[in-house]
Image (spheres, rainbow, N blue to C red):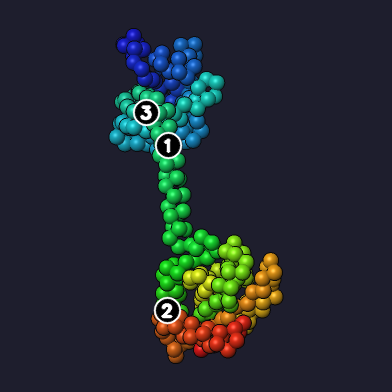
C-alpha cells in the first residue's frame, strides 16, 4: 500500500484522533519538506496556516463528524521552511476518528482565481470609465446634459415628496463666441473650465451642477428659496466678473426659476422659465441675475 501511495502525484496524510499526522507519502515529503518517518507525529496546526487551522477546527471536523467525509476544501499548507502552499483536500473520517487526507496542488487554481479577480477589477475600471463617458462632460468634469435630466427628475420627485422648495439657475457666458474668435479655442476652453469651477465651488453634495451645452450651465438646488438662490447667483456672477484670464474679461448672465409647495412642475417647464429669465438678463445688458 505504501508503495502504491508513493506513486501518486498527490499528497496523502493519515491523521490520528488527536489530529497528529503520523503518515505522509513521498509527495508530501518532497513538496513540503516534512519527514514524518523521523517523528512520532506532527500536529495539523503545524502543517497548515493559522487561518486554515481555524477553518479545519470550526468547519471541517464538525462536518466530518456529521457526514464522515468532506470534498473539495481549499486550504493552505505550510512547507517545513514556512512557505505557503495551496491545496485542495478530500477528507474521510473513520470509525476510530482517524482521518484520511488526499491533497491536490492548486497553485494553478489560485493563479486562475487571481487572474479572474484581476479581470474583474479591469472590467470594473472599464465600466467606471464608460459610465463617466456617458455622464460626465470631458472638458469641465461636470455632469452632461443627459445625466442632468436623469438626476433632475429624481431631485424634483424628492422635493415634491418632502414638500421642499427648489431653484434652478441657468448660467450663460456673455459674448463667448467673441472670446473664441479673438483669443482662440484654447483660451475659450480655459474660460469654460474656470466658470464651471466657480459655479461648483461651495456647492452642497446634493446640488446638481451640469454643462447644459456650449457655454451654458445649469445649477439645480433643493431645499432653498428664491431669495437665497438669488444670493448664490449674485455671488457666482461677481466672482466670475472679478476674474481676468489671459486679458479676457469674463461675465455671465443668470436666469432663475424656482418651485415651492404651491407650485410644482417638471424639469422642462422649470428650465423654460429659467431660460426665459436668462434671455431677459441678456436683453437688458448682460452680466445680470434675473428671476422669473
User: Is residue 100 visible from the viewing direction of this image?
Assistant: yes
Q: Which residue is mark 3?
A: 89
Residue 209, percent from left and from top: 53, 71
Question: Residue at point 62% right, 66% down?
Answer: 183
Q: Secondary structure at mark 1?
A: helix
Question: Residue at point 36% right, 12% down?
Answer: 6
Q: Which residue is mark 1?
A: 115
Q: Residues within 10 Å of mark 2 (few under 14, many from 20)?
A: some
Closest to the observer, 183 or 58: 183
Residue 277, percent from left and from top: 51, 86
Q: Earlier in the sequence, mark 3 or mark 2?
A: 3
Quadrant in the picture for residue 254: bottom right
In whole angstroms, how far apart are the C-alphas of marks 1 and 2?
46 Å
Q: Which residue is mark 2?
A: 267
In whole angstroms, how far apart are the C-alphas of marks 3 and 2?
61 Å
Q: Earlier in the sequence, mark 3 or mark 1?
A: 3
Quadrant in the picture for residue 64: top left
Amino acid at each position: 500500500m505504501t508503495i502504491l501511495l508513493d506513486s501518486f502525484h498527490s499528497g496523502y496524510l493519515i491523521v490520528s484522533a488527536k489530529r497528529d499526522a503520523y503518515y505522509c507519502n513521498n509527495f508530501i515529503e518532497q513538496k513540503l519538506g516534512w519527514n514524518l518517518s523521523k517523528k512520532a507525529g506532527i500536529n495539523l496546526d503545524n502543517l497548515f496556516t493559522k487561518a486554515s487551522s481555524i477553518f479545519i477546527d470550526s468547519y471541517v471536523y464538525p462536518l466530518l463528524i456529521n457526514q464522515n467525509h468532506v470534498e473539495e476544501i481549499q486550504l493552505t499548507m505550510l512547507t517545513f521552511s514556512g512557505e505557503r502552499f495551496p491545496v485542495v483536500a478530500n477528507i474521510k473520517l473513520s470509525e476510530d476518528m482517524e482521518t484520511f487526507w488526499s491533497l491536490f496542488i492548486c497553485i494553478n487554481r489560485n493563479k486562475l482565481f487571481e487572474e479572474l479577480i484581476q479581470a474583474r477589477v479591469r472590467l470594473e475600471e472599464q465600466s467606471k470609465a464608460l459610465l463617466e463617458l456617458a455622464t460626465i462632460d470631458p472638458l469641465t468634469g461636470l455632469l452632461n446634459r443627459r445625466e442632468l435630466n436623469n438626476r433632475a427628475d429624481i431631485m424634483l420627485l424628492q422635493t415634491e415628496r418632502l414638500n421642499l422648495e427648489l431653484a434652478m439657475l441657468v448660467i450663460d457666458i456673455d459674448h463667448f463666441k467673441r472670446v473664441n474668435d479673438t483669443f482662440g479655442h484654447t483660451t475659450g476652453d480655459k474660460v469654460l473650465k474656470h466658470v464651471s469651477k466657480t459655479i461648483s465651488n461651495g456647492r452642497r453634495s446634493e446640488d446638481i451642477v451640469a454643462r447644459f451645452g456650449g457655454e451654458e450651465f445649469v445649477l439645480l438646488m433643493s431645499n432653498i428659496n428664491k431669495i437665497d438662490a438669488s444670493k448664490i447667483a449674485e455671488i457666482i456672477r461677481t466672482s466670475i466678473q472679478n476674474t481676468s484670464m489671459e486679458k479676457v474679461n469674463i461675465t455671465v448672465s443668470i436666469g432663475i426659476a424656482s418651485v415651492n409647495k404651491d407650485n410644482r412642475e417638471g424639469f422642462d417647464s422649470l428650465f423654460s422659465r429659467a431660460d426665459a429669465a436668462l434671455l431677459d438678463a441678456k436683453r437688458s445688458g448682460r452680466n445680470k441675475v434675473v428671476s422669473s
